[in-house]
Amino acid sequence: MLADGGLPQAGMLSLFYDEEAMVWGDEPDDREHWRLLWTPADQALVRHSVPAR
C-alpha cells in the first residue's frame, strides 16, 4: 500500500502465503509467513526456481 493507504495505479501486486503454517495474521509473529510484493509495470519479470527448504 502507499503511504496514503491506497493501492498503486499500475504494476502488479503478488501475495505469497505460507499455507503450511495456516496463520491468520493477527499475531506479530505471523509476519514471517507472508509477503506482498509490488512490481512496477515497466519491469520485466524473471522466473526463478523454488528455493530448497
Image (tube, grey):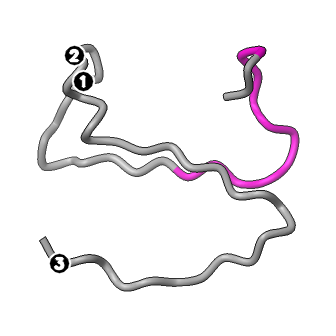
- Specify few, some or many for label 2: CA neighbours under 10 Å numbering under 14, 14-19, or 20 or more: few
- Quadrant for residue 40, please give it: bottom right
Q: Distance between the residues labelled 2 and 1?
A: 8 Å
For residue 49, side relative to residue 2 (left or right):
left
- Residue depicted at 86% across the width and 67% down the height: 42
The reply to whether dot 2 and dot 1 touch (C-beta < 8 Å) is yes
Q: What stretch is highlighted in magenta?
A: 4-14
Task: Please tell me which of labels 3 and 1 falls first in the chain.
Answer: 1
Per the image, the residue denoted by label 1 is 24
Look at discs 3 and 1 and give the one toward the viewer: 3
What's under tag 3, amino acid-wise? Ala
Residue drawn at (73%, 26%) of the image = 2
Q: Which amino acid does label 1 sit on?
A: Trp
Q: Where is residue 16 in the image (x, y as percent from the top left)?
A: 40, 51
Disc 3, SS: loop
Q: How crowded is mark 1: few (under 14 residues within 10 Å), some or many (20 or more)?
A: few
Residue wearing tag 2: 27
- On the image, the x and y values in percent for residue 45 come to 66, 76
The quarter of the picture where residue 9 lies is top right
Residue 42 sits inside the magenta stretch = no
Quarter of the figure that contains the N terminus: top right
Residue 15 disc label: none
Q: What residue type is labelled 2?
A: Glu
Estimate the spatial distance between the alpha carbons at disc 2 and disc 3, rounded to whole Å.
Answer: 26 Å
Q: Please, what secondary structure does the residue beneath circle 1 have?
A: loop
